[in-house]
Amino acid sequence: MSGLFQPIPSNLVDTTSNQNILGAKTFTNTAISSGISSGALVIGGGLGVGGNINVGANTSNHNIYGSTNFGNGGTTTQNFYGTVNFASNSANHNLNGNIAFGTSSASHSISGTLGISNTTISSGISSGALVIGGGLGVGGNINAGISSSTHNINGNGIYIGNNTNASIQIGNAGSTSVTIGSTSSTVKVGWASNTVINIGSLGSNITIGDTTAVLIVPCPSAFQKVLTSAGRKSALRSVSTNYTTVATDEFIMVNAATAPVTIALLSAVTAGAGAKITVIKTDSSANAVTITPVTSSGSIAVQYNSPSFVSDGTNWHKF
């Protein structure tokens, strides 16, 4: 066409002045973005959007890199759908305002360190700097506050080390004060089988329950040393062959009916001053029961004789 009016070339775009576009614009290019300089649309400066931004489908992955501020106005609501990865390149991301994650039951992963600077004290499950409506699974250690502060764990049923073979350490710092349960609570420590339980370390002061509490410790009857409503239960072991005592032994019942038996006491140094062992001969035979090493006679020849031996930290003494 010739004359005053000429068709505008389809690839002509004014890139030097401000443009107001009233209609909807669709970019059909499907180039994937791998950074700020690639993709179907590349913007060299900032982007201001007055309405909602929807990226991909609800189940797609969305990667946001760089120093990113969401809801910096303070009162806006941000909804993220699909899998959202933050700090995958160790960048800083500030999330302000009301933020809803997983409103479509999608998965969200935070690969970097998540820091919450809010210092609100928690007085229950609905208050604090971080409030989680459901359960919390933690693969590593949990450190609360500093070693000299008070830490309260409240709830209707709290399980620590409930899985088999769990190792539990409570109050490992020598000066830490540890209180488990109140006057009306039920306390269960290491309820699963094969649980290793360390409560406090040497020098720790430990109070579990109060004077009216009943402490139930699940362990073999041979090592049961528990003060219950029925009285104190001591560690009782029965043997019919030579035996070397261990630190948890208190009463050794010996049946020497078929042959003499020797009971070798644990080293007095290892047992420690004040450790006590009582040996009882239960059979009526002439076979002797010999206890070693002791500073005086350690032989029992008469049925139901039951000498006791106490350690002074160096030697075992008969009394």
Image (cartoon, rainbow, N blue to C red):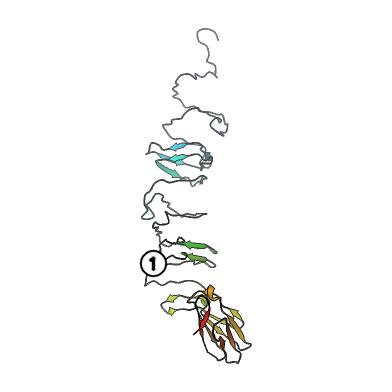
The answer to which of 183 and 104 lies nearer the viewer is 183
- Circle 1 sits in a helix, a strand or a loop, which is it? loop
Q: Can residue 247 be seen by looking at this rendering?
A: no
**Is 109 rendered above or below residue 49?**
below
**Is 22 rendered above or below residue 279?**
above
Q: Can residue 291 be seen by looking at this rendering?
A: yes
How dense is the environment of label 1, judged by Cα within 10 Å: few (below 14), some, or many (20 and up)?
few
Farthest residue, direction top: 3
Task: Please tell me which residue is depicted at 44% across the width and 40% down the height of the picture.
Answer: 94
Percent across and percent down for residue 273 are 49, 75
**Is 184 rendered above or below residue 136?**
below
The answer to which of 310 and 133 lies nearer the viewer is 310
Task: Please tell me which residue is depicted at 50% across the width and 8% down the height of the picture.
Answer: 4
Farthest residue, direction right: 259
The number of callouts visible is 1
Percent across and percent down for residue 285 are 60, 92
Circle 1: residue type: Ser
The answer to which of 275 and 191 lies nearer the viewer is 275
- Placement of the N terminus among the 4 image quadrants: top right
Provide the residue designation for mark 1: 185
The answer to which of 14 and 64 lies nearer the viewer is 64
Task: Please tell me which residue is depicted at 51% across the width and 82% down the height of the picture.
Answer: 317
Percent across and percent down for residue 213 are 39, 71
